[in-house]
Image: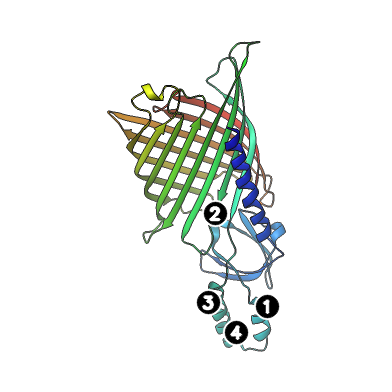
Amino acid sequence: MNNYFIKIIIIFSFIYPLKIYAANDNKKVVITLKNGDTLNGTLIESKSTNNAKTLDHPQLGELTLSESIIESFKLDAKATEDKTNNTVDSNTSTSSSSNNNISEVKSNDEISKWSGSISIGLDEDIGYEDFSRSLDLDLSIDLTNEKSIYTNTISFDWTKDESQYEIGGSYYVSDSLEIDQKTSMDISNRNMEIYFSNNYDYNSDASYGKNSLISSIGLTKGFFDSDDTSLSISAGPAIHFVYGGDECDITTDCGETYLSSVFSINFSNKLSKKFELEINNIFTSSYASTAIYGNELSTTLTFRPSDSSGFNTSFKYENDYKEFSNPKFEDKYSLNVGYDF
């Protein structure tokens, strides 16, 4: 399991320097809002976060814009040159030059929207009556670039659990790893996306079904087009592969590939300027000799001191049921401290 952890650290060590390298000095940018307004100015990197961008506008001064109201966000590489050339133009020619400038900017390299978060915390497994403690490491990365209609995300969740079944007894250590990858593409219908996802789960404690991989393709429909609230529902067919464990050779439902279906709901609500609630539920139904079900529910309450701070604290509750593995049920909560980058 240490190899899995090392791989996670290597991936983080590779991607995070790219983010730092991309964040050079303050840049001239063109920001188009969802209401159609266009703002030209200087991006203030030190005050910008994953959720909000701070712009120094030549007429309006310093503006902080929520990510939810931004339609596009582009690097204005020719802003200085265009400003010099247009100083003596009339109002009509200035308007025309501004429109031409926006068209030219679209062909320039655009600012990457690569972002992510990392958190570490302690878990408590509700299923153990005597004693259990866990160390949990979460890493999620948004690999989306503004130039593409695709969104690409990947997340890692590694947990080391140390359990003591009797007071004064020996400890039992187990590891689990979850890797989720999703690629989405906008389609012509409003708030509709085509998605492709891979969900991999590893549990060293499982006697069978130690490894599980679900690959799915389908449609996502978004609701509640609001700055503070979002709701999306996804559904589609899938392929479910289950293998690994000491009892896998003698269990008919292990070491096989099954047709499956996935139905998921993702909800988020910004309760206030500092608190945000997220609820995610994934239901799977795989078709072996009989239908075999799985359900993964997670609820997270996150506290952020301010929009300009990347630090956050979150309380998370997870409830997992997997008929394809043994043990089948996991019920835990965790307290995490993290940082958005």
Residue 103 is marked as 3
Q: Position of residue 220 (x, y in %)?
A: 39, 50
Q: Name the residue under label 4.
A: 94
Amino acid on which the number 3 mark rests in the picture: Ser
Q: Distance between the residues labelled 2 and 1?
A: 30 Å
Amino acid on which the number 4 mark rests in the picture: Thr
Q: Mark 1 points at which residue?
A: 80
In this view, the mark in front (2 or 1): 2
Q: Name the residue under label 2.
A: 143
Q: Where is residue 134 in the image (x, y as percent from the top left)?
A: 61, 27
Residue 158, visible in the rendered structure: yes
In this view, the mark in front (4 or 3): 3
* Mark 2 / mark 1, whichever is N-terminal: 1
Q: Is residue 262 left or right of residue 133?
A: left
In this view, the mark in front (2 or 3): 2
Few, some or many C-alpha atoms within 10 Å of disc 4 (few <14, some 14-19, many ≥20)? some
Q: Is mark 2 on a helix, strand or loop?
A: loop
- Residue found at the far front of this picture: 249
